[in-house]
Image (cartoon, rainbow, N blue to C red):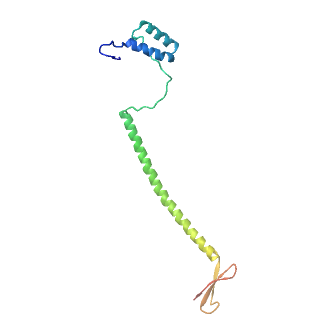
Amino acid sequence: MDYIDGNEKVKTAAESFAELIDVTKKDLDKEDQIMLDALEEKKQEPSDKDVFIYETELAKHSVREPLTKDEKIKLADQMMEVEKEIAHQEGELEFHKSEIKAEIKALESKRKNLVEEYKRGTKEIVTDCYWRMNYPESGTKTLFRKDKDLVVKSADN
């Protein structure tokens, strides 16, 4: 209710409602307009049975509401499972980390051997060999490749 002044009359709810009717009439459907026109003619406040609800289209909206005890227990169980999974994944990470480090170390060793072989210009192979004693001189032994009959190395006896 609006109070104008102590000496002036107070706007009645019906008068306020009549003003509201003029503003909202444009947005209402035909049935609502008929009802409002009837109320305007009576110049009285609507009773509970005359009140209508004007709904718009339904829309989904996210709201918060308190959790029940069962919901809290269920969430606690889910949190525990997530913690277990995190611990498991961290363990897997450490395992794979050490495994990968070992692979990297092996690859670095292979790289070192390849670089050395490249610099030497020779490669190492396994082949059948034989020793010849007292060759080329007495008291020495010489290792020969069987396939090419080349000297591999000589040593003192």
**Quarter of the picture holding the C terminus:** bottom right
Quadrant in which residue 78 is drawn: top left
- Estimate the x, y position of residue 65 in percent, counting from the top left: 39, 31
- Estimate the x, y position of residue 86 in percent, counting from the top left: 44, 49
In the rendered view, does 8 fall on the left or right side of 157?
left
Residue in the picture at 44% in, 47% down: 85
Residue in the picture at 46% in, 30% down: 61
Direction bottom: furthest residue: 138
Q: Nearer the viewer, residue 39 or 48?
A: 39
Q: Nearer the viewer, residue 94 or 39?
A: 39
Is residue 109 shown to the viewer in this render? Answer: yes
**Quarter of the picture holding the N terminus:** top left
Quadrant in which residue 142 is drawn: bottom right
User: Up-down: is 4 above or below 157?
Assistant: above
Residue in the picture at 40% in, 43% down: 79
Give the tally of numbered discs: 0
- Estimate the x, y position of residue 128 in percent, counting from the top left: 65, 77
User: Up-down: is 48 above or below 129?
Assistant: above
Direction left: furthest residue: 6
Is residue 124 shown to the viewer in this render? Answer: no
Q: Nearer the viewer, residue 9 or 119?
A: 9
- Estimate the x, y position of residue 53 in percent, counting from the top left: 45, 17
User: Up-down: is 152 above or below 116?
Assistant: below
Residue in the picture at 49% in, 57% down: 96
